[in-house]
């Protein structure tokens, strides 16, 4: 709910627990129901009962000694900002129960918000006015807005995006809230990037992954053990909306990404940004080629780890961006790389009694790299003139311990130094083809 003009009716849901009343308000029934369902407040399939409240926007916040103490005081505030008729109509509507008024005013910086509950009409006044024939509408209005109806201040906890994602100070919040990101690959990198984008305020997600969460995944995946055995895409959509109930949409496809899947491709290319975190060359290349052939296209960001996450690269592909294939050989071997591996068998490890190859890295390396990918994505969504490539480089001693070296091209591109432990932006490819000495 935006803390700005005009004054208006809003939607309200309440639940009493003991002597306490929990009340949630939003601009529309749809927004309110989405928040209640996403947060887990409502059980799936249960239809809530909504009522109406009044949102009153003032020109300036009242001083503490000016806070309204009765229905009459609130009527005076409403009339001062041209909302007298709105308040009268609402108080007539809520004549038989308590009335909730949310009051806000723009301040620098942000907004001041408080709420007040107007007590029910006393039984004696109700009997003499509401339940009596021949009483004029003016007399009824005077009773409904009389000083006898006390106004009690209520504590307001704000959950709106502008407050949560920047305390009303982030100029990018509206842009991020209206953006939809299609994420291909919801593994360790993809899930962590999605979590950071949701934390930043992105309001829509389309998540694609055909894998399920297993026990070893939980050490470096955003999802925990409560989602074991669940499809990663669907579980991630659920977890993001529980974390941030204001997310307006989190749709999932628990199936492989295939460019022949017309329904999936239509959804993906209607997003504002596509992020490929699969790290699988066949997927990266096919998505790149399909994206390149489109006349109207969203930005495409491709992110991947080098072996053991000693480095992470994210490359933007757009009309003003780069060619992904420019840094790869035709077979998918990355020649424009940060690291090189004299012993190819050291690029991956094979755990005991395990038939699959494994890239050894932990949660700390993941967080370091994912934050830079998320930063790149936000720069694209908010038109912050992003560079074509964002690179995060791990520690030199870890590279050495895993059996790797800095690549010759990368060292030359950095003036002969060994650039470890940092994040930077670059062009793509990272450097030109290195001409090795014949000697």
Image: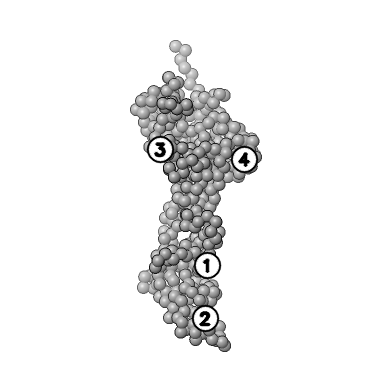
- State which tag comes first along the sequence, 4 or 3: 3
Tell which residue pokes out farthest to the left in this image. 397
Residue 168 locus on image (x, y percent): 44, 56
Q: Secondary structure at mark 4?
A: helix
Q: State left or right for residue 219 relative to residue 328.
A: left
Looking at the image, do the residues carrying marks 1 and 3 touch, with CB atoms under 8 Å apart? no
Residue at 50% of width from left, 26% of height from top? 334
- State which tag comes first along the sequence, 1 or 3: 1
- Depth check: 114 or 387 in front? 114
According to the image, label 3 marks what residue? Answer: 219
Q: State left or right for residue 413 relative to residue 264.
A: left
Residue 273 in view in this figure: no
User: Tag 3: Cα neighbours inside 10 Å, few (<14), some, or many (≥20)?
Assistant: few
User: Tag 4: Cα neighbours inside 10 Å, few (<14), some, or many (≥20)?
Assistant: some
Q: Which mark is residue 282?
A: none
According to the image, label 2 marks what residue? Answer: 141
Q: Secondary structure at mark 2?
A: helix
- Tell me how many marks there are: 4
Is 264 situated above or below 439?
Answer: below
According to the image, label 4 marks what residue? Answer: 265
> Gap between marks 2 and 1, in whole Å?
21 Å
Looking at the image, do the residues carrying marks 4 and 3 touch, with CB atoms under 8 Å apart? no
According to the image, label 1 marks what residue? Answer: 51
Q: Secondary structure at mark 1?
A: strand
Looking at the image, do the residues carrying marks 4 and 2 touch, with CB atoms under 8 Å apart? no
């Amino acid at each position: 709910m935006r803390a700005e003009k005009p004054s208006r009716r809003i939607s309200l849901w309440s639940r009493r627990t003991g002597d306490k009343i929990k009340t949630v308000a939003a601009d529309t029934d749809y927004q309110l129901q989405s928040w209640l369902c996403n947060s887990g407040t409502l059980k799936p399939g249960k239809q809530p009962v909504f009522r109406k409240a009044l949102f009153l926007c003032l020109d300036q916040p009242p001083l503490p000694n000016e806070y309204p103490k009765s229905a009459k005081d609130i009527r005076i505030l409403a009339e001062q900002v041209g909302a007298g008729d709105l308040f009268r109509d609402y108080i007539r509507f809520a004549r038989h129960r308590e009335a909730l008024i949310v009051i806000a005013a723009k301040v620098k910086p942000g907004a001041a918000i408080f709420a007040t509950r107007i007590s029910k009409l006393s039984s004696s006044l109700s009997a003499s006015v509401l339940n009596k024939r021949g009483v004029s509408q003016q007399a009824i209005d005077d009773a409904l807005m009389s000083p006898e109806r006390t106004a009690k201040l209520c504590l307001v906890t704000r959950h709106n995006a502008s407050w949560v994602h920047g305390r009303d100070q982030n100029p990018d919040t509206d842009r991020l809230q209206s953006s939809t990101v299609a994420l291909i690959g919801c593994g360790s990198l993809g899930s962590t990037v999605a979590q950071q984008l949701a934390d930043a305020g992105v309001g829509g997600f389309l998540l694609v992954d055909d894998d399920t969460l297993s026990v070893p995944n939980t050490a470096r995946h955003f999802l925990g053990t409560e989602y074991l055995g669940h499809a990663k895409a669907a579980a991630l959509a659920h977890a993001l909306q529980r974390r941030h109930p204001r997310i307006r949409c989190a749709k999932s496809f628990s199936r492989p990404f295939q460019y022949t899947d017309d329904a999936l491709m239509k959804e993906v290319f209607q997003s504002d940004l596509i992020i490929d975190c699969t790290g699988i060359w066949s997927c990266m290349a096919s998505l790149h080629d399909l994206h390149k052939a489109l006349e109207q296209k969203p930005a495409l960001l491709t992110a991947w780890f080098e072996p053991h996450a000693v480095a992470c690269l994210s490359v933007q592909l757009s009309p003003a961006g780069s060619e992904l294939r420019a840094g790869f050989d035709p077979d998918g071997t990355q020649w424009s790389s940060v690291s090189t591996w004299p012993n190819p068998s050291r690029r991956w490890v094979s755990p005991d009694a395990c038939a699959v190859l494994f890239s050894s890295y932990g949660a700390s390396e993941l967080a370091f790299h994912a934050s830079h990918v998320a930063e790149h994505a936000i720069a694209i969504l908010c038109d912050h003139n992003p560079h074509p490539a964002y690179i995060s480089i791990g520690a030199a001693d870890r590279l050495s311990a895993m059996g790797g070296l800095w690549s010759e091209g990368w060292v030359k591109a950095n003036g002969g130094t060994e650039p470890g432990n940092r994040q930077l932006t670059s062009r793509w490819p990272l450097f030109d083809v290195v001409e090795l000495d014949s000697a």
